[in-house]
Image (tube, coloured by chain):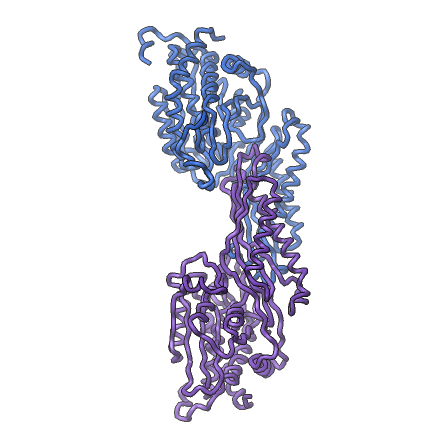
Chain colours: A blue, B purple
Amino acid sequence: MLNQDHKDRITAAVDAAFDQQLHFTGELIRHPSVRTEEGSAQDFLYAAMRDRGFAMDRWELDEKALKEHIGYGPSTVTYDGVTNVVGTFTPEMERGKSLILNGHVDVVPVGPEDQWNRSPWDAAIIDGWMYGRGSGDMKAGLAANLFAFDAVRAAGLIPTGTIHFQSVVEEECTGNGSLSALMRGYTADAVIIPEPEENMLVRANVGVIWFKVRVAGKPTHVREMSEGFNAIDASYTVMEALRRLETEWNAERDEHLYFENVEHPINFNFGLIRGGDWPSSVPAWCEFDVRAALYPGVPAEKAWKAITDCLQESSKSLGTADAEVTANKTGFFSEGYVLEEGSTAELVLERCHQDVFDTPLETFTTPGYLDGRVFTLYGNMPTLVYGPISEAIHGFDERVNIESVRQITKSIALFIAEWCGVSEEEARTQNRI
Amino acid sequence: MLNQDHKDRITAAVDAAFDQQLHFTGELIRHPSVRTEEGSAQDFLYAAMRDRGFAMDRWELDEKALKEHIGYGPSTVTYDGVTNVVGTFTPEMERGKSLILNGHVDVVPVGPEDQWNRSPWDAAIIDGWMYGRGSGDMKAGLAANLFAFDAVRAAGLIPTGTIHFQSVVEEECTGNGSLSALMRGYTADAVIIPEPEENMLVRANVGVIWFKVRVAGKPTHVREMSEGFNAIDASYTVMEALRRLETEWNAERDEHLYFENVEHPINFNFGLIRGGDWPSSVPAWCEFDVRAALYPGVPAEKAWKAITDCLQESSKSLGTADAEVTANKTGFFSEGYVLEEGSTAELVLERCHQDVFDTPLETFTTPGYLDGRVFTLYGNMPTLVYGPISEAIHGFDERVNIESVRQITKSIALFIAEWCGVSEEEARTQNRI
């Protein structure tokens, strides 16, 4: 356990550098790191890690290798030039436990930009919030990881365990970024991922499957509409069948530990739709993208079978032999995970959180995908997904609460110090910061 | 009335040149004249008309002028380089009645080409059908107009009334092509448009309105799906409201002469849909294109008001103040028309049809848009929409029945001769063909 002097020095150091941390976070937000365009943001983070003296590693994702892993999510893009960045701090003498501080650098598209009150990339600070796509999800967290480490150092302390700072891609679509980092050999005694989790710790979350449904048939002129098959109308029939499956799965929540009290744990989202070619032609095709969720413990293959069975059944209900319903995996093919209660890592975080927030650490179940499943399911590492308050992630005017970021940074800094252990820096170097 | 000798000579001349006519039709189909790309097909028709000695006219559509006309359909494309072609035959001495032979050169998109059994542009002839996008709708008709005239001439006869051969654009989306021809001053005592009408005459047809509906709202991360607004789901709610309006209008068919026995005269077609940006973001927007129909006699503005009222009402039912439903006109804004019974033009066509087909001319009501409304409503001309048997227009493997094309050509040729009158060509020139 940390002594009060160390705690005070560390939290004071977070405060002292917090303006700089916000400036850094804003710069990171200004890199519009949507999928496959993370390069400049990774350059920025690479430089920031290198400047801290970390041993640097950067590599392109290897789809062929990833495909061999059960946690792989089929990609619809090429990974040419798409890289992870990891910076490793190694103590002179390894005495404490090791730690991975992970975050994803990819952000989701902004949607119709005219519905934003300002540019999604300007990182404006207004009334205690920092705005921008990726501000909450999760560039504030990526910055917090680095500045938490800085605070420990600025407090005149040196961690005595190895720390891997990971900036990964693909968290918003496949999870292949963290998976690639795991497959590259990065493991540790615990993992922290400061996703925007309302100052709480994630106890459990769902798995996610992405798939594209194509409904196709025989079109006609509108004048013969009743003879033809309208793929847009038919798509809604198929969506209704999927909604019934979603209802079934939600009804089973009592059978799944930590999900009993989640109001609607299983969300099927119809996120994209495209269909038809001409207003006066009955549309021959329609495609829509679905994001479905599954409980921890349910193999993705089992959920996928239920989904494809549902689609096959719905195709019969379209009432014409001309209709064809097909589905393809297009991203996440992931299982959910549970953070087992009682780990040492969680106990340490509870203490750090209590010190900073003066309230007990709450845990909760989230119905969204998290890379935590990679480290938990395939690396057997206790993984603490724990991060700041945000609003409108994936929406317009996404923002992160600045005071919350400050506190989370302090909490992570204390965690580093207690988990990895610290030694006092020698006097001769104490003044350098 | 034509004497039997003239009839025999004319129909024999159609037969004699029919291989050539099919060849010409095939060449025309091989020009993929989708919207705004009609240029090369118009070049081809221009040359064909010029070679027949017609006085040629070709002009670019003038959107600004068109907008002043009540029959204008708002265009979503620019008309730079988009032209109509008209060739005029003028007799030495005008004794008979004048005639417009109209056809549209634009064709609808092919849709997913892999669902065609062959290229949509190869104009293959198989088992008595000519295939290809636009084969039925309506390049066979455009060719029939010219070859019907040729047959009269090849029979050694010269029409004694003026004939305008029109190849217009924009029939599949706005009707602005024929409207532009009318506004340029082209009128006649009757009009024939050989659209694919199953060897029948159109008695009445619907008006058509095209519009795009945009449903927009406030999106969120899927984990907060129940708080957010899903524009794709909401679009379906809006579509259902439009379907109820469609049902209401169909229930009124008894009040509309010639529509009492049409099974489903009013078709609302959802022809295109586009929405959302990311599978795991609740979609903020969705747009769909609607083709709606209205009865003859119903002003387009009145139908439009009912549609926009319906949309406004449906937006309230979305249950969130964040939802916005807007609609814009995107093409046809046209009223339907009725071909009044008892016109001389129709009587003449009845006779010609009986002569060729040996069965009485049937009339029918069609629930599809026709340029006939331009000539009927705004030019007060008896307009005979009458053409060959087709299958799968606007669909895959569109085709036109070759024997039907032959007969329709004969029927039009006899009509030219009777309507315009003919004089015997002088002996010295009889051998030139």
Is B225 left or right of B86, judged from the image as shown? right
Q: Residue at x 53, y 29 (%)?
A: A370
Is B30 left or right of B128, judged from the image as shown? left
| Image location (x, y in percent) of residue B285 | 52, 44
Q: Is residue A147 above or below residue B28?
A: above
The quadrant holding residue B251 is bottom right
| Image location (x, y in percent) of residue A154 | 37, 13
Q: Residue at x 65, y 39 (%)?
A: A245
Quadrant of the drawing holding the C terminus of chain A: top left
Is A363 left or right of B139, judged from the image as shown? right
Give the farthest residue toward the bottom.
Answer: B427
Foreground residue, A279 or B142? A279
Foreground residue, B284 or A318? B284
Foreground residue, B343 or A230? B343
Residue B136 in view, yes or no: no
| Image location (x, y in percent) of residue A387 | 50, 23
| Image location (x, y in percent) of residue A67 | 49, 35
Residue B337 in view, yes or no: yes
Q: Residue at x 68, y 65 (%)?
A: B254
Q: Is residue A361 above or below residue A368?
A: above
The quadrant holding residue A37 is top left
Foreground residue, B227 or B283? B227
Q: Is residue A217 above or below residue A197?
A: below
Q: How many numbered circles are shown?
A: 0
Q: Is residue A417 above or below residue B92?
A: above
